[in-house]
Amino acid sequence: MAAPPAGNRWIPAYIGIGSNLDDPVGQVRRAIVALGALPGTRLVVASRLYRNPPLDHSDQPEFVNAVAGLLTRLEAPALLAGLLAIETSQGRRRDPATHWGPRTLDLDLLAYGERTVAEPGLMVPHPGVARRNFVLLPLHEIAPGLWLPGLGPVAALVRGVAGHGPLYPVADRS
């Protein structure tokens, strides 16, 4: 994938990862590896994996979620294109009718440096980040000092969602 670079500067980016189909633990682990293989990108850190119930539609399997921290030279739209390619390679088929439904893999660009991005199909920071414990708790695990533009520090945001439903670490079986 040829992509326009963000220049010679490395930009920190954080990616939310979720799956509830076709071996969710394996899907999330494969996605973490694939993130590090994106061109002009280095995987720096990944959170533990967490199990949690679906956000709104309880008639589906529970999710496995994590957050990965990257350094990238890709511009935000090119990074998003890479995320979508990873989703597709791991069996994700987007269907607007089942937007909140089960999925093999969901990758969300949560933060991209200190930048805000508002383009068709791309909003950074991710619009749901401040309301989702399955995003904020793993993000806080790897980047407690992170400041999300327009939202504030992750450490303060996480206190507002700490009690929003169960979140269980996945036992490491490796």
Image (cartoon, grey):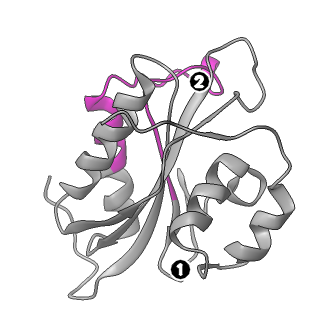
Nearer to the camera, 7 or 108: 108
For badge 2, the amino acid type reads Pro
* Residue carrying label 1: 115
Q: Is residue 93 magenta?
A: yes
Q: Is 14 rendered above or below residue 163?
A: below
Report the residue at 63% width, 17% height from top.
97
Residue 145 falls in image quadrant: bottom right
Report the residue at 61% width, 75% height from top.
144
**SS class, disc 1:** loop
User: In this rendering, would 155 be left or right of 47?
Assistant: right
Region of the chain picked out in magenta, as a range:
83-109
* Residue carrying label 2: 96
Instruction: Work out whether residue 151 can be spotted.
Output: no
The residues bearing labels 1 and 2 have C-alpha atoms spaced at a distance of 28 Å
Report the residue at 65% width, 46% height from top.
134
For badge 1, the amino acid type reads Arg
Sequence-first disc among 1 and 2? 2
Mark 2 neighbour density, 10 Å: few (under 14) some (14–19) many (20 or more): few
Q: Is 168 rendered above or below residue 5?
A: above
